[in-house]
Amino acid sequence: MPKPEMDLYGGEGHNWKSIIFSLMVISFVIAGIVVAIYLLGYVDELLYWSGRRMRLDEFLRGDLTVNRLPTTWVSPHQLIYQADDGGLFAFNTFNNTLTVLVTNHTLRQLNVRGYQCSPNLRYVLFQHNIREVYQRTFTATYTVYDVTNDELLSSHHIPLFGEGQRSWDWQHASWLGTNGSLLLVADNEVLALPGPPARRAQLLQLTYDAVPGRVYNGVSDWLYQDGSLVLYVQYDDTAVSELKFPRISEGIGGAGASRAGFLLPALNSTLHTVFPDHITIRYPTPGSSIPKVTLWIVSVENTSSTPQKWAVKPPTTLDGMEYYLISAQWVGQDNSHVGSVWMNRAQNLTVYSSCYAPNWTCSETHSEKATDEPWLEVHQKPVYSEDGSAFLLLAAVQEGGGQYYTHIKHVDVNRQRIAVLSHGRMEVTEVLAWDQENHLVYYLGSADRPGQRHVYVVRDPSYGGGSNSVRARAEREEPRCLTCELAVWPARLHYANCSFWRAKFSPLALPTRRSFDVQLGGGSKARVQLLLPPSWREELRDAAFPVLVHVDGRPGSQQVTEEYLVDWGSYMASRNDVVYVKLDVAGSRGLSRALLRGRLGGVEVADQLAVIRYLLETFKFLDVTRVAVWGWGYGGYVTAMLLGSQQSTLKCGIAVSPITDWLYYNAAFTERTLGQPSVNYKGYVEADASQRAHHVPAHALYLVHGMADMSAPYPHALQLARALTDAGVLFRYQDYLRECLSLDPEDTKLPPPDR
């Protein structure tokens, strides 16, 4: 007989208690293993890392930034600053006394973003409700605050608006003279409001020739001290090419309106509003017409008739040239001398001139020419002596090794003598003050470390009565650093209150910054800064942190600095355990620009790629499989060029508003490096990022752009997107169709640009 089949379901029942107990034991073992791995992996972190991670919302809102109003001098001994409680104070350096000008309640009530004190400190002009128009242009509401009448709210807030003029339409407002008069700009016209503000006088229109979108009249604090004459500049964009981009709105009934609603007869008359309108701005491109600039002087003394005005004629050196006006200012103790600085369109010639009444024709007093340097930089306006016979300027000076650094030159107009006051392999960034009574010049410089800034003082050439003895020259020429050794600095008063920093940053786990130089081929070097996450330590051996490289490379820029700031890199390192890398390569401030002459996207891109490779080979805690780059504007251009370099070092990149084709970028920046397209067309073609689109790896690029972001107009992103599409490269593309002229980090959750 065949054996009976085994009954799989027969027999005694299962021992469920044993099974459940076994599963519990297995679960406890697995949980123990997981906990052990977790503890072993993070024991060092638990012992050494303290503080909480930074949050995205607090960074984007600016909670970790000191949003204080600027500190200003209103006289040689009166300093205005915003205290920790938010109020505005006047500090007298003679007797070390403090006076409250504006309470913190008033500043918060108006949400003040800027201020100007009248010369007698009776009034304070508040700027608030700022509304962006274009990049770096805005309108705002201006309110006059009466310091002596703080308790009467109805009388100490005096909004500025004229008949038919909305209070937020002002493009500019500043004090004019000493009697409380105001100088204003609205609708591209210059106006004056006779003072004092409590009189509520009628507006006096000084210009009448503005044309919307084409002719602009404006001021830049160019007014004579007694308020009788105003110096202003006029820009004529009539011949400048136009840039149009769509204005995307929500349409009829908003974003959620039903499409069926458009079929209603009542809406037939409004159908034309369904399609996007467009915005037109003037945008000069390489080889095309640039704005025509004219400098004017207008009198505000006679308010009963049309104001009298005179055109300031540029120096004859610029005859037959296109040029830019760099700065203009009143010079001396009377109203007969204007100092102006002009630069030719090629930006290899800067002319300093003096213009005198009554015909206001400018004559050249000094000029700077680019010889070995590819172009001249735009620096702060000259600092003139009280009588106008001499002035200080910043210019490139050749030091040892043939490299150029920015230093101070003293120009004696009467004697036609030029003296260099600062020296060494350092960059002077600003002339702070000229104490002519004691023959001392104070300035800001980079010392031995390019990322630092220190205050220096040096004697001017007139010290010692013009003596040329060895001792007199030594005392004149040797600068002295005032802030290099703060511990022994003989300060009269030291103000230190870090309550804000202690409250905001003591609970946070912030990254560690390390800066160093990397030697590259050909004797050049790059500056590098690593933002190391809180969990990083030197003794870690097996850690592998992802790497995010912030690329820029814009000529004259500087990313590696020892300035204390909380930026996007600080957030990424603190929150996401990312090693954030900043680079300064060829063309950056203090580094050679010679190799950038006539070409972009070459040496600065190659240098950044070489530095990234060096870092990955040198520091074993960097994860070579997780390396990303990102940049905004010029940095977006460098990101696209790096991804298209046929290298496998980079995993991915984010290009925000990248420049693609330099033929469509702004003329001033492009022409100083690449020159005219008719002369250097090859340089333009080789610098075109779309030429490398077919080398970009699939899924490696995230392209982001704002329709109205003027850091690089939208055709650049569209051209790069088309080149990638034609090459069959898959990429991610995101466009923000807002009307604002820049991407708002609060809305886009993108890091703010470094411009």
Image (cartoon, rainbow, N blue to C red):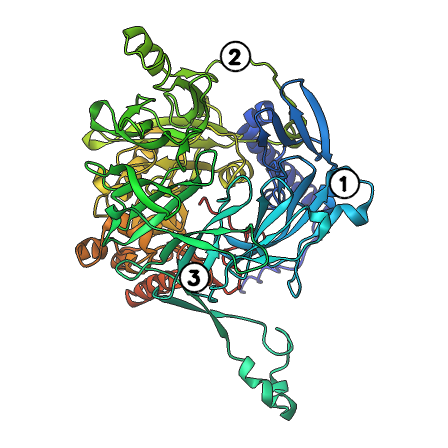
Badge 2 amino acid? Trp
| Disc 1: which residue | 105
Cα–Cα span, label 2 and label 1: 36 Å
Badge 3 amino acid? Tyr
Q: Which mark is residue 489?
A: 2
Q: Residue 694 carries which label?
A: none
Residue occupying the far bottom of the picture: 265
Return the residue nearer the eye: 529 or 468: 468
**Quadrant showing the C terminus:** top left
Which label sits in the foreground, 1 or 3?
Answer: 1
| Disc 3: which residue | 733
The reply to whether the C-beta atoms of the residues labelled 2 and 1 are less than 8 Å apart is: no
Quarter of the view holding residue 744:
bottom right
- Using the rendered image of the protein, determine whether residue 361 is visible from the camera's viewpoint: yes
Q: In this view, does 526 lie to the left or right of 657?
A: left
- Label 3, secondary structure: give it: strand
Lower position in the chain sequence, tag 2 or tag 3: 2
